[in-house]
Image (cartoon, rainbow, N blue to C red):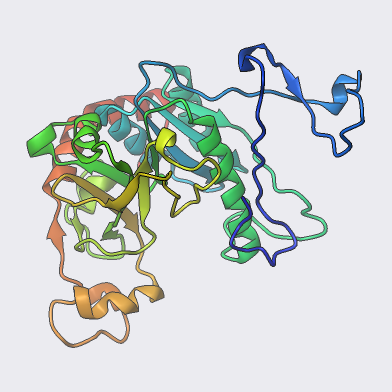
């Protein structure tokens, strides 16, 4: 499927071809545009087949896109430990120019089977169309969407796939479901649901920390806004979703299935980030009073302490500290 950025010189496209034989028997493939052509014998003209991850007992996977440059390794440990606690089976991520401390974190979680790392993802045609990882423009967005397609294709073998980044946490209602994402997802996904949209609660990291002395980043910034429809993400079932329709912020359900927005009383979504100028559109809904702040847009937002994040932080703290010490990583 082509990207919404169809006018761009580079577009993300995924081809889907019928395979009339057992796919496990295929090692290499190639594409031809002449139906009369015969297969070439030179193996360099083929690409090696990568089969989807997962097995019969695999339930939950996270597609976490690109880890790059200065990503904080100490905070990354917290994120992975939270996913372990909540029952995630596999996390797929890509790297590009990632710092050595964060690489060690990914190596560790890959060694214990939680992570699958695609190293040094590169962007095509960089000489012709210059752009840098982390830039906020249409070309860079198209590159991210290529990763999204690849990531979701590799996770077709899982029952549920969560699209979220490493500053985002999908959390079940712990009072109802304990530390089990699986139980909360089974509660949400009836026979007609293909996926659910997740609207984030914003943990604004430019606020005064809730607990400055905490050894965990997520516990320092326990306060958040209420849920807003800002950079929403989603959870979906691959078998109920149109192949190739998944983007970073959306998907298309197969005929006969529906999508809806998850309620925070069942499944919550937390996004840790700095205040952004774009948040001005939420001032009326999120401010304590009617007066809008001119300088710090987020200063007047009403704050809510997130008890479930606090409980998760306490539960993972010992493991986080052990892994940090083992890898020689400190939280500043």
Q: Is residue 11 above or below residue 82?
A: below
Q: Quadrant of residue 6?
A: bottom right
For the point 65% across and 61% down, the residue is: 139
For the point 42% across and 45% down, the residue is: 255
Q: Is residue 35 left or right of residue 259?
A: right
List the single residue furthest toward the front: 256
Which percent across, then down, holds residue 269?
Answer: 27, 50
Which percent across, then down, holds residue 223?
Answer: 18, 57
Q: Total label count?
A: 0
Determine if residue 168 is in view.
no
Q: Is residue 174 above or below residue 304?
A: above
Q: Nearer the viewer, residue 257 or 116?
A: 257
Which percent across, then down, holds residue 329?
Answer: 41, 34
Q: Nearer the viewer, residue 205 or 301?
A: 301
Which percent across, then down, holds residue 183?
Answer: 19, 30
Q: Is residue 124 above or below residue 226?
A: above
Q: Is residue 132 left or right of residue 218?
A: right
For the point 75% across and 48% down, the residue is: 124
Q: Quadrant of residue 292?
A: bottom left
Q: Nearer the viewer, residue 266 or 69?
A: 266
């Amino acid at each position: 499927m082509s990207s919404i950025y169809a006018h761009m010189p580079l577009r993300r496209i995924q081809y889907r071809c019928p395979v009339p034989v057992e796919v496990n028997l295929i090692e290499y493939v190639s594409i031809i545009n002449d139906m009369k052509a015969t297969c070439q014998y030179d193996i360099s003209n083929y690409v090696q087949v990568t089969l989807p991850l997962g097995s019969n007992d695999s339930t939950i996977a996270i597609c976490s896109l690109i880890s790059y440059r200065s990503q904080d390794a100490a905070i990354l440990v917290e994120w992975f430990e939270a996913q372990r606690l909540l029952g995630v089976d596999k996390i797929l991520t890509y790297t590009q120019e990632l710092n050595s401390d964060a690489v060690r974190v990914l190596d560790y979680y890959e060694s214990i089977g939680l992570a699958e790392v695609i190293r040094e993802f590169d962007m095509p045609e960089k000489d012709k169309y210059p752009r840098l990882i982390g830039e906020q423009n249409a070309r860079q967005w198209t590159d991210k969407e290529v990763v999204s397609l690849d990531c979701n294709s590799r996770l077709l073998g899982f029952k549920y796939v969560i699209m979220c980044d490493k500053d985002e946490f999908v959390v079940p209602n712990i009072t109802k479901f304990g530390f089990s994402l699986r139980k909360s997802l089974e509660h949400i996904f009836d026979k007609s649901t293909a996926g659910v949209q997740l609207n984030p609660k914003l943990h604004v990291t430019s606020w005064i920390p809730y607990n400055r002395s905490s050894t965990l980043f997520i516990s320092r910034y326990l306060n958040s806004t209420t849920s807003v429809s800002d950079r929403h993400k989603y959870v979906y079932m691959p078998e109920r979703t149109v192949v190739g329709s998944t983007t970073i912020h959306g998907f298309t359900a197969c005929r006969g299935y529906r999508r809806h927005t998850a309620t925070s009383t069942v499944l919550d979504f937390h996004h840790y980030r700095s205040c952004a100028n774009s948040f001005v559109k939420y001032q009326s809904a999120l401010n304590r009073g009617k007066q809008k702040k001119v300088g710090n847009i987020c200063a007047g937002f009403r704050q809510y302490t997130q008890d479930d994040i606090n409980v998760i932080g306490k539960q993972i703290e010992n493991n986080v500290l052990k892994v940090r010490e083992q890898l020689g990583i400190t939280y500043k």
